[in-house]
Amino acid sequence: MHYPETSEAASKFVLLALKRTKELGISANPIHFTVWYEYFAGKNSNLNSSVDALMSIDGKLDEGSCTDLNDRFIIAGANSARDKEWSDRIEAVTERLVDVLTATGSEAEEYGAALKTFSGRI
């Protein structure tokens, strides 16, 4: 997760998240708190749309729903970003390996040709 907010903005989101968990009567544990922090930060439009839809049903969001939202929109997003980072790293290493193997293959061919020439002269 990436949180570039200023300390003033982050403090505002913290207070709003704590207030909302209290209003809903759910614990402000890291999972529930993070859902509401992300919601008030407004950077996860899919999360916000889902929260708004769930809240429009009966004006409440229980702990189970918060956990589901966390899994779907926060954890999955973090895993996706981490997976992309690893994929990019693996691709870069693979490209370097191909380059090295190609260069090694060319050098081996040149060495073989040099041995043939040398053995022919002997």
Image (spheres, grey):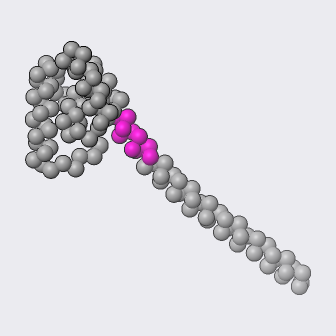
Side of 65 where 77 appears, left or right: right
Q: Is residue 97 visible?
A: yes
Q: Is residue 50 above or below residue 79?
A: above
Q: Is residue 78 magenta?
A: yes
Q: Report how many numbered discs are placed on residues in the image.
A: 0
Q: Residue at point 12% right, 30% down?
A: 18
Q: Residue furthest bottom?
A: 121
The x and y percentages for residue 22 are: 11, 23
Q: What predominant SS class does the magenta segment belong to?
A: helix
- In the rendered image of this protein, does residue 78 appear above or below residue 89? above
Name the foreground residue: 85 vs 110. Answer: 85
Q: Nearer the viewer, residue 94 or 56?
A: 56
Q: Is residue 63 visible?
A: no
Q: For residue 17, which quarter of the picture?
A: top left
Residue 41: percent from left, percent from top: 20, 40
Picture quadrant of residue 44: top left
Quadrant occupied by the C terminus: bottom right
Tell me where the magenta segment starts and ends, as one range.
Answer: 75-84
Q: Residue at x 9, y 35 (%)?
A: 15
Which of the 4 image quadrants contains residue 25? top left
Residue 37: percent from left, percent from top? 19, 35
At a point 19% along the width and 28% down the height, the residue shown is: 29
Q: Is residue 25 left or right of residue 86?
A: left
User: Residue 55 in magenta?
Assistant: no
Is residue 102 shown above or below 76?
A: below
In x, y percent, where is residue 16? 12, 33
Q: Residue at x 32, y 33 (%)?
A: 46
Q: Is residue 64 left or right of residue 121?
A: left
Question: Toward the viewer: 60 or 118?
Answer: 60
